[in-house]
Amino acid sequence: MGYTPELKDLIRRVEATRPARIEKARRGEHFAALSMDGRKERLQGYHPDYKSEGKRTLKVGPNKGETHPVEIAELLESRSRLPQNVVLSQVDFEADLLIIGGGGAGTSAALIAAEQGLSSIIATKLRHGDSNTVMAEGGIQGASQEWDSPVYHYLDTMGGGHFQNDPALVAALANDAPLVIGWLERLGMLFDKLADGRMKVRHGGGTSRKRLHSAGDMTGAEIMRVLRDEARNRTDRVRVIEFAPAVELLLDKSGRCGGAVLYNLETHTYHVARAKAVILATGGLGRLHVQGFPCTNHYGATGDGLAMVYRAGVKMRYIDAIQYHPTGAVYPEQNIGLLITEKVRGLGSHMLNIDGEQFCFQLEPRDVASACILRECTDMGKGVMTPTGRSGVWLDSPMIDLLHGEGTVRRELPAKYIQFIRYGIDISKEPMLVYPTLHYQNGGLEIDENGGTVVTGLYSAGEVTGGVHGRNRLMGNSLLDILVFGRRAALTASAYIRGMNGGAPKDLRLDHVKKFEKELDKAGLLEEAPRGPFLLPDYLPDEVKARQWAGAGL
């Protein structure tokens, strides 16, 4: 397949400017980064988070009165999907700790809980490991080198989040990072290393020091490999239940969390899981396709945990802040929305408009870089149009081999090379065409620095939470986030369980759900509210749905 003749003609403009750009890069000269005022102007003018369209005000719940994207508002103000005949007194599964979500945060929590002598159940929507963890590519941050410090990591993270991060969460993230890197290596993770055995580290957007550790361009998959392998070696204390997403939390009469109702996707039956404490690690909401953007997320990323905890009274923090990764594939059509890791830019690739010109410093923070691309493709009129009418800019990946030696692309970006060569595009020879894609949920439910929530016995970790990244996440902090707070939540939950007075919560109930639905009804929302959590995305066109209903005689 490859590029069309028209696109190949436009690539010649990129090739014409490349020699001069390469020489500047070798001299350490780069396109000027925007000032703080310049970044603010770009964001307010072009980033989707700053636009008023496609949003509405919440009418019920802890965040009542706030304005959020329609897709998120519908999730938070959804009604329960539970039927009336679920028997809560019939317990199907029981353990010390119930972990909802089987990605990096949930699995790391289970491993730490096992070390503390606790039994745990991981209830996961799809297969164990099917998560945004395995979709993460470029690396994990950690101040492991002598020129770096958790102080610099802390400052970079605060700046990247526009200083709206929770300082206590950021301190936990930066201070635990070197410990997490060491823990992963002891578990058997194969990090990229130099010939002398030292860690190979690179810059990411918004970093003042090289602290990005990677495993090719499959870092998340490698992390998930070692975590899942370790969990499978601890089956005496870690039980995994696949294809069983949680749909409601269960609280006792005093409001303590003591389990959840699970839904079996294969048998379409409901089951009660009881535990002394619960850790929520359900991940992000990319498959809601906020404001119509394509996404990089795994198939089950529908924000389930947010709907459940909102009904239980947990407030959201920065839930309107969505990260649109600046470099999502926009050609070929089969790769639409595919994540092009920031590591490509960290290795020196430039972002270029239709004339082969740089318009943005390649390592601006993600939200700023996305806003710059959107500006170039709209107001500036310098985007590159695909045969299907999509607009994008060039990411000049052939620069990598020219700067670092032939074979670097295939060695450092093996997955990306394969994902494009199958369609006749050799990214070591031809640039990629990219456009912002929905990548990450910056905000989420409120937690403290140990993963605790306002609900006794309920803890949380990972992308479902908010506060640590402020309004924008830096590259490499998501894989770190899930491990730092997955581990911390497990330690805190373990201490809570050991100190319990009166044993595990009994007489579990759904009073909080009934109360929430009364609020929906009072606000005039109940009848039209969708049933949530949504569990899986619905990609059927309306006309197909209409034919299905007609064929069923309804």
Image (cartoon, rainbow, N blue to C red):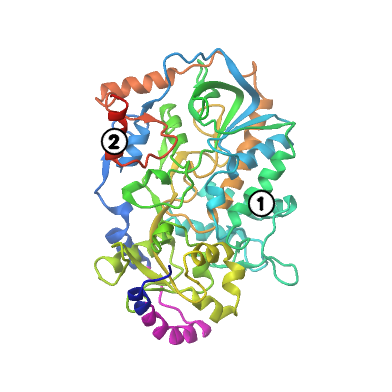
Left or right of 175? Residue 515 is left
Q: Please give the residue where the numbered disc 2 appears in the rendered image.
A: 65
Q: Secondary structure at mark 2?
A: loop
Magenta stretch encompasses residue 417: no
Q: Is residue 13 above or below residue 533?
A: below
The crowding category of the residue bearing disc 1, from other C-alpha atoms within 10 Å (few below 14, some 14 to 19, many at least 20), is some
Locate the C terminus and report the quarter of the image it occupies.
top left
Query: Relative to the observer, which residue lies in front, 142 or 80?
Result: 80
Q: Which residues are magenta?
A: 11-35
The residue lying at 52 percent from left, 69 percent from top is 346
The disc placed on residue 244 is none
Q: Please give the residue where the numbered disc 1 appears in the rendered image.
A: 180
Left or right of 308? Residue 72 is left
Magenta stretch encompasses residue 32: yes
Q: Inspect the image, locate mark 2, and give the three-letter code of the amino acid beneath it.
A: Gly
Q: Inspect the image, locate mark 1, and give the three-letter code of the amino acid beneath it.
A: Val
- Position in image of residue 240 (x %, y %): 64, 33
